[in-house]
């Protein structure tokens, strides 16, 4: 699957979450293969754990590689994987953090050698190697500045950070650990240190050894050929037929089977997992009913609503609808003369009948939101905010209050801004092919026309759409953020410094909001943070750079012959390796 | 060859009566005649789509005044007048008139009927005020009226077919005929004229497009009309430059070196152009250009036209390659007709028959290309519904048969009708049919 | 004949060069900066301004490595305001803006001076360490500078300048950079004062020599005959080095080679089938013109032709591929047998999977070709010599197949050259619906992602294949019609 929404790695808070799942759950004894076939809308780009860019590749890689810690897909809490337990964290007197891990004694690579701290160090050095093509993730690990090992405790090590950050724990252990012997047989990276690669970047910019390593590591075979991809996970790559399917098979004698009381990620029942690419949704649905697929996610709301009518489907499949940790919104460019007044933005919010849209576009499969905090985070979600109601009359009145009148009688409102007459002509952009977004745009267009706002609906290719957002070349757009069950860091989206390089497309930000965002980032006390987050939601609601729409629910179908297939709020929404046949 | 004697006679005798004869022949083919009539109906629907399906009343009495909102909307669109305050941004069907005449279909394709969303079947119960407001062909996902979409879609598909093939035929017939007729040895030009024309080509491009690129670029951002005007200015500039060059060429003839005649290998040049055009996959080119520029149906038509002329050119070239060696053309030469006259009056009409089929099929193909582009979600603006876009919406809801049947049938009928007319013309144009 | 063939092959060379130039111009003018596309993917990066320097460095490095800092072509034909050093300016957006400024003011050196002062000013602003009180103000200035780089309208520039002045008056601790700001303003004013409106109407030619993007793309940087190879050298299109895909950073050839195989297979089979079926249908409907049988065939063909293939493909999948209805065919892909399975098994499985896609690809051209065949046949049958042959009492079948058929093949042979590229680019809809990883789909995805190396190479492949197709068609043409003379005899 292509990343439809820029994946927000760092957002959201750890909270107790209730899985809302309706439909299925019932299982059925069917004689069938224990192998699992998962549908993918498009081929993964590569199976290189640091260089991949597409979300689908990330889900597949989780079966081949392991990280120190992972967010458990059931409890949504951090759970140790290669690490023995969650790390010990202490603040240093210099205002930084020391994060100490111990690796599981059972953890082994395929050659029988134990996983050692040196492998972790190696992985971090790979990530920080300036020639490795992992620009996407490298910035997230800049905060790790040093690596300490302990000669008398061979499995223990400490990561040093020179700042305090709410996400330090989560991101200190979320990268896939690479076997040093396998990826660097020549020992090219041995002579470098994490400290050097982080703090003296200039010095290493043209180092030939780093370049030689990177050439091999970036090469096509490291991302596609089974002889050159290996990790500590339960599966290994068996076959990759480009554009068709990726097949993983379970390793014999995988070390994880010996782990007692491990998390769910240690359960690997499926002997073989196939990721089958079918580009067209309609075709994929037929293939599902025909029994060629076992798992399908992100089924279109409309199709999902009609699936129960199919006998073949209800006989063989369970439908699941876990709430997704994501929200959709309509972004408004606050730097445009037409939209710079918050009254106008609020008026637009009053023109959108979100509840009706949930009904007719999402077929009821969504939950309304009022801010960037997911409603499932009960402690932090501000329930005191009343969502904007659908009220064209009020919208009209607010526009008049803001000084927008139709003085020239052409049916479009206008106003004199900075000495120039500005017409209320706006452009609504969405990424082409996304019919749900198009429908929202057309509905808004129709309602806005009646109050004198002329909206032009424009579809743009994904890359152009993103480029225009980054360069703030838009008036209104439809967007979505996917979150992870970790504390929310609003800096990337709402801080004014993110206007030039980050994702603050709308140009929102004042000294007050910046200060609030900065203090949320470093507040380690959850209850204090919750209060701050509530204040932040009020601020956003008032300023309305976003019109917050809804948190969609995921739409998944899983074959009835599998147990242990409970869906999760975390993407992709299931742990396919854990599926087992009904006994 | 035995046929030639007869052909000489046809050509020399029947210059004036040629088209009259074609007309007579065409009338004999009943199917083609009915098809042509059907095309007239399509043209009527396309031209008067606004009066057949519209949200605005044709006439109404409101607050003791009689209004003609539909006509008025034209003058407002052209910037000639403004709406009365009471009609600004109203929902026309909710106003309380004393009396009112709505068009037969009281919806525009972009109107969203919130009460009949999620694809309502024509036979299902609809939430409408009265039968007057019924959606006779059902609605789509958002509640657009399909009948209205079909009527306004007629206009788009007709435009797409006619304009694109018009462009294609113009380029194709001209280049193909030149290539086939002149071949590599029949077109001669003085050396001075040739050199000056090559220089003029560069200069024309520079002044027409190079130095005006920003003006043109800004114009396309404002409106298509503005762009079109600027484009015409560019073409005019180019024409002037060529005219000047050719005038100069007359003067240059004084020098013997420039007077000398050179042979221009027209066939090689045109054949290379055809080869180049044909080798670039059209659909990719359209998608690439449409992906770069703003979606507009006119752009799509222009690109389809400028990329599909090769088929026509190839046909006419191949035919003329045959025709030019036939005796009747040579006798036209012998009779002292000029090259151009021979080419346009005698050679081309004799080669038109396969071209007309190609154009008829081309119109159909253009309509199909438009529907494929709609399937990909590019080409037309989001709020515009075309036959193709309704049909591709049907793909996602297989149970909503009305979204598939009506546009599918419309495309089928249109394509077929063009083909029948094309064949009727083929037969009528065939000189051997004249008895 | 052999001479003609050789001549045609020689003529291929300029044709291919012109096609490559066309594609080159198209991709050079496409919006979007390829270097940026390659650097930051869909991720949101953290947006710390401390990173600015390192990203800029990475940008310049990659740009240099890919050769985007070179001029486009051997020479350029433009107006006298443009500079022969413009291609050295890093960002595409900045480059475009400078070009426009130069065109407006007609004096490149003044424009360059303005750009340089703006850069100095930007550096001086980034050198200021931000503290809590000035962070917003500093950020405001950075935004305005960013905007200035992309603005040529005088009114807007004036607004940005006054915005910056306002910020300075409210945040005194930023004043260190004020001098540099003044210089920028002065440079802008100088540029405005010394306008030369006519300069853009004077044509100019710049010559760049062999160090240009097109040359590098065609011949590569590695030496052809002598000299030593440097690491990172590329070999150029002529030596089968088609570049690197922006998207997954794989070599283009490795992305396209499988796709090419599937597409060539799909399109040749479907064209072959279409011809095999269309010729007899066309002949029959010409002979039996006006009969009920002919009308029925014609109508069926029209119906087929006028139904968009995406719609037919969907219907077939829904009704025949094991959904809620019949389960006769597989709905997607090419089969799952491993490459080491016996050839016959794999062949059978692939064939089974290709039945529906090939049907969808060929029915449209089937109608088209058979109509043309019918037209050609009717044309010939009406001619005197056929009538004479019939009058002589020759057997009808013999007349049709021996005399008329050969001559009526002409128009449909010309079609071959048109159908082939259309089959390749038209196949993407079918490839998409049936999930066949062919060239059409690969190219479509590449167009959408602005992955130009792939688009470029795919188009070149199609072009070369088509040229070969055209040549074959022309040869056949000559073989069929003796009237066409290929030699230049008078």
Image (cartoon, coloured by chain):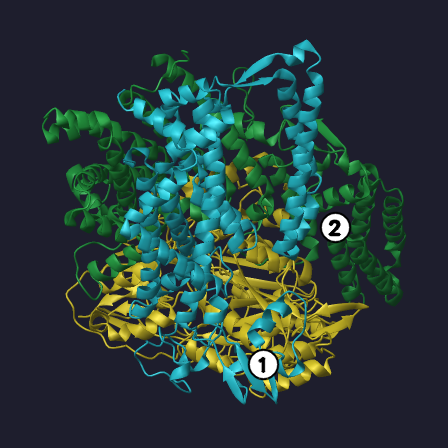
Chain colours: A yellow, B cyan, C green
Q: Nearer the viewer, residue A309 or A95?
A: A309
Q: Residue at x 81, y 46 (%)?
A: C120
Q: Chain of mark 2?
A: C
Q: Residues within 10 Å of mark 1 (few under 14, many from 20)?
A: some
Determine the residue located farthest toward the top in the rendered image. B256
Residue B337 place in picture, x, y as percent: 49, 23
Q: Residues within 10 Å of mark 2 (few under 14, many from 20)?
A: some
User: For the point 26% across and 59% down, which residue is it?
Assistant: C315
Q: Position of residue A339 (x, y in %)?
A: 68, 71
Residue C216's mark? none
Specify whether residue B109 is in view: no
**Which residue is disc 2 drawn over?**
C149
Q: Quadrant of the N terminus of chain A?
A: bottom left
Residue at 21% x, 58% y: name it.
Answer: C321
Real-space Cα separation, disc 2 to disc 1, in angstroms: 44 Å
| Residue identifier under label 1 | B90
Question: Can residue C418 be seen in the rendering of this structure?
Answer: yes
Identify the subunit bearing mark 1: B
Q: Tell me: residue A6, above or below residue B61.
A: above
Q: Nearer the viewer, residue C97 or C471?
A: C471
What is the x, y in percent for residue A525?
Answer: 60, 77
Horizontal side of residue A565 vs A392, given as left or right: left
Quadrant location of the C terminus of chain A? bottom left
> Quadrant of the rendered structure where residue A389 is?
bottom right
Q: Are marks 2 and 1 on the same chain?
A: no
Q: Nearer the viewer, mark 2 or mark 1?
A: 1
Secondary structure beneath label 2: helix
Q: Position of residue A236 (x, y in %)?
A: 33, 50
Image: B350 above or below C297: above
Position of A537 compared to B17: left or right?
right
């Amino acid at each position: 699957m292509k990343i439809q929404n820029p994946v927000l790695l760092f957002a959201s808070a750890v909270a107790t979450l209730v899985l809302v799942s309706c439909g299925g759950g019932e299982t059925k004894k069917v004689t069938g293969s224990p192998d699992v076939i998962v549908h993918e809308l498009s081929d993964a780009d590569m199976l290189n754990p640091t260089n991949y860019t597409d979300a689908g590749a990330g889900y597949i890689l989780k079966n081949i590689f392991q990280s120190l810690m992972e967010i458990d897909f059931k409890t949504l809490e951090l759970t140790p994987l290669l690490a023995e337990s969650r790390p010990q964290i202490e603040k240093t007197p210099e205002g930084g953090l020391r994060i100490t891990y111990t690796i599981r004694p059972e953890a082994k690579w395929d050659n029988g050698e134990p996983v050692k701290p040196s492998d972790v160090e190696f992985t971090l050095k790979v990530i920080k190697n300036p020639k490795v093509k992992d620009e996407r993730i490298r910035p997230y690990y800049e905060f790790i500045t040093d690596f300490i090992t302990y000669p008398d405790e061979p499995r223990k090590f400490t990561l040093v950070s020179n700042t305090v950050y709410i996400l330090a724990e989560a991101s200190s252990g979320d990268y896939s650990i690479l076997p040093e012997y396998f990826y660097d047989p020549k020992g090219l990276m041995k002579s470098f240190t994490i400290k050097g690669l982080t703090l003296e970047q200039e010095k290493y910019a043209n180092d030939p050894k780093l370049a030689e390593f990177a050439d091999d590591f970036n090469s096509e075979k490291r991302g596609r050929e089974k002889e050159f991809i290996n990790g500590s996970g339960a599966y290994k790559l068996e076959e990759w037929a480009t554009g068709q399917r990726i097949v993983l098979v379970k390793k014999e004698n995988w070390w994880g089977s010996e782990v007692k009381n491990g998390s769910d990620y240690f359960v690997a029942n499926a002997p073989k997992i196939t990721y089958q690419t079918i580009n067209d949704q309609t075709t994929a649905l037929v293939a599902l009913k025909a029994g060629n697929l076992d798992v399908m996610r992100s089924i279109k709301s409309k199709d999902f609503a009609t699936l129960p009518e199919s006998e073949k489907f209800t006989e063989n499949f369970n439908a699941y609808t876990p709430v997704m940790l994501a929200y959709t919104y309509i972004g408004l460019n606050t730097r445009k003369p037409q939209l710079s007044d918050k009254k106008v933005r609020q008026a637009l919010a009053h023109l959108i009948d979100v509840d009706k849209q949930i009904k007719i576009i999402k077929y009821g499969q969504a939950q309304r939101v009022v801010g960037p905090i997911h409603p499932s985070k009960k402690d932090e979600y501000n329930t005191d905010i009343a969502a904007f109601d659908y009220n064209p009359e009020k919208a009209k009145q607010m526009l008049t209050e803001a000084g927008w009148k139709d003085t020239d009688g052409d049916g479009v409102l206008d106003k004199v801004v900075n000495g120039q007459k500005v017409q209320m002509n706006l452009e609504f952009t969405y990424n082409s092919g996304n019919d749900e977004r198009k429908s929202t745009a057309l509905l808004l267009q129709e309602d806005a026309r009646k109050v004198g706002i002329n909206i032009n609906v424009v579809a743009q290719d994904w890359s152009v759409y993103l480029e225009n957002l980054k360069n703030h070349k838009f008036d209104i757009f439809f967007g979505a953020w996917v979150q992870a069950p970790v504390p929310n860091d609003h800096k990337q989206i709402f801080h004014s410094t993110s206007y030039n390089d980050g994702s603050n497309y709308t140009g929102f930000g004042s000294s007050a909001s910046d200060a609030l965002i900065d203090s949320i980032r470093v507040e380690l006390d959850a209850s204090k943070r919750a209060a701050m987050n509530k204040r932040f939601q009020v601020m956003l609601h008032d300023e309305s750079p976003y019109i917050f729409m809804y948190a969609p629910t995921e739409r998944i179908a899983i074959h009835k012959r599998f147990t242990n297939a409970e869906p999760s709020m975390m993407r992709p929404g299931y742990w396919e390796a854990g599926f087992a046949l009904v006994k | 060859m035995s046929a030639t004697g007869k052909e000489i006679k046809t050509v020399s005798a029947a210059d004036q009566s040629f088209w009259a004869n074609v007309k007579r022949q065409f009338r004999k083919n009943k199917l083609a005649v009915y098809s042509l009539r059907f095309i007239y109906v399509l043209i009527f629907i396309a031209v008067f789509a606004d009066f057949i399906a519209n949200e605005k009343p044709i006439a109404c009495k409101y607050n003791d005044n009689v209004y003609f909102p539909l006509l008025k909307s034209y003058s407002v669109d052209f910037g000639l007048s403004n709406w009365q305050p009471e009609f600004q941004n109203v929902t026309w069907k909710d106003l309380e008139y004393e009396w009112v005449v709505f068009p037969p279909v009281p919806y525009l394709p972009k109107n969203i009927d919130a009460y009949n969303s999620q694809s309502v079947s024509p036979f299902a119960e609809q939430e409408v005020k009265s039968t007057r407001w019924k959606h006779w062909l059902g609605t789509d996902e958002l509640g657009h009226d399909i009948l209205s979409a079909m009527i306004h879609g007629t206009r788009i598909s007709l435009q797409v077919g006619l304009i694109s093939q018009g462009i294609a035929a113009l380029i194709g017939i001209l280049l193909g005929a030149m290539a086939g007729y002149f071949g590599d040895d029949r077109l001669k030009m003085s050396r001075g004229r040739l050199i000056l024309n090559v220089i003029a080509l560069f200069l024309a491009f520079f002044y027409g497009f190079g130095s005006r690129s920003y003006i043109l670029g800004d114009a396309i951002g404002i409106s298509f009309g503005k762009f079109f005007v600027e484009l015409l200015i560019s073409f005019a500039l180019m024409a002037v430059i060529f005219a000047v060059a050719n005038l100069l060429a007359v003067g240059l003839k004084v020098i013997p070196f420039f007077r000398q005649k050179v042979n221009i290998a027209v066939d090689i040049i045109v054949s290379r152009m055809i080869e180049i055009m044909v080798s670039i996959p059209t659909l990719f080119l359209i998608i690439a250009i449409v992906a770069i520029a703003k979606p507009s149906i006119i752009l799509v038509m222009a690109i389809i036209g400028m990329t599909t002329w090769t088929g026509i050119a190839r046909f006419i070239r191949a035919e003329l390659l045959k025709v030019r060696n036939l005796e009747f053309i040579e006798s036209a030469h012998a009779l002292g007709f000029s090259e151009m006259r021979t080419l346009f009056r005698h050679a081309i009409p004799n080669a038109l028959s396969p071209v007309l089929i190609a154009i008829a099929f081309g119109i159909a193909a253009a309509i199909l290309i438009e529907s494929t582009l709609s399937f990909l979600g590019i080409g037309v603006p989001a709020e515009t519904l075309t036959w193709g876009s309704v049909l591709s919406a049907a793909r996602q809801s297989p149970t909503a048969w009305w979204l598939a049947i009506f546009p599918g049938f419309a495309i089928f009928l249109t394509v077929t009708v063009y083909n029948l007319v094309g064949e009727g013309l083929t037969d009528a144009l065939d000189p051997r049919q004249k008895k | 004949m052999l001479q003609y063939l050789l001549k045609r092959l020689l003529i291929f060379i300029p044709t291919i060069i012109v096609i490559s130039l066309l594609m080159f111009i198209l991709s050079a003018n496409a919006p979007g900066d390829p270097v940026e596309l390659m650097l930051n993917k869909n991720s949101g990066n953290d947006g710390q301004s401390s990173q600015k320097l390192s990203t800029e460095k990475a940008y310049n490095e990659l740009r240099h490595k890919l050769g985007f800092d070179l001029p486009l072509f051997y020479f350029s034909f433009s107006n006298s305001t443009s500079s022969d050093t413009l291609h050295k300016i890093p960002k595409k957006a900045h480059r475009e803006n400078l070009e426009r400024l130069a065109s407006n003011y007609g004096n490149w050196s003044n424009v360059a001076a303005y750009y340089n002062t703006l850069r100095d000013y930007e550096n001086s602003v980034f050198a200021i360490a931000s503290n809590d009180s000035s962070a917003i103000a500093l950020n405001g200035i950075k935004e305005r500078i960013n905007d200035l780089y992309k603005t040529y309208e005088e009114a807007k520039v004036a607004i940005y300048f006054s915005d910056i002045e306002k910020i300075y008056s409210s945040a005194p601790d930023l004043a260190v950079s004020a001098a540099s700001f003044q210089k920028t303003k002065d440079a802008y004013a100088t540029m405005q004062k010394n306008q030369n409106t006519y300069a853009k109407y004077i044509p100019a030619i710049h010559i760049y020599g062999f160090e240009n993007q097109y040359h590098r793309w065609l011949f590569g940087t590695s030496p052809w005959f002598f000299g030593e190879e440097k690491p990172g050298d590329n070999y150029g299109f002529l030596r089968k080095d088609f570049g690197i895909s922006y998207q997954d950073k794989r070599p283009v050839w490795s992305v396209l080679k499988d796709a090419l195989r599937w597409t060539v297979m799909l399109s040749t089979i479907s064209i072959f089938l279409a011809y095999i079926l269309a010729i007899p249908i066309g002949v029959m409907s010409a002979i039996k013109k006006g009969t009920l049988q002919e009308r029925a065939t014609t109508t069926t063909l029209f119906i087929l032709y006028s139904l968009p293939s995406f719609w037919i493909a969907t219907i077939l999948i829904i009704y025949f591929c094991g959904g809620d209805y019949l389960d006769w065919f597989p709905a997607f892909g090419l089969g799952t047998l491993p490459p080491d399975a016996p050839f016959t098994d794999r062949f059978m499985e692939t064939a089974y999977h290709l039945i529906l896609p090939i049907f969808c690809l060929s029915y449209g051209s089937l109608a088209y070709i058979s109509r043309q065949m019918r037209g050609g046949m009717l044309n010939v049958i009406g001619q005197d010599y056929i009538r004479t042959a019939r009058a002589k009492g020759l057997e009808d079948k013999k007349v049709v197949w021996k005399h008329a058929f050969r001559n009526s093949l002409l128009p449909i042979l010309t079609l071959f050259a048109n159908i082939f590229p259309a089959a390749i680019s038209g196949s993407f809809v079918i490839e998409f619906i049936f999930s066949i990883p062919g060239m059409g789909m690969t190219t479509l995805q590449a167009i959408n992602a602005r992955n130009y190396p792939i688009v470029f190479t795919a188009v070149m492949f199609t072009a070369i294949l088509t040229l070969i197709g055209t040549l074959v068609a022309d040869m056949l043409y000559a073989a069929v019609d003796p009237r066409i003379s290929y030699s230049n005899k008078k």
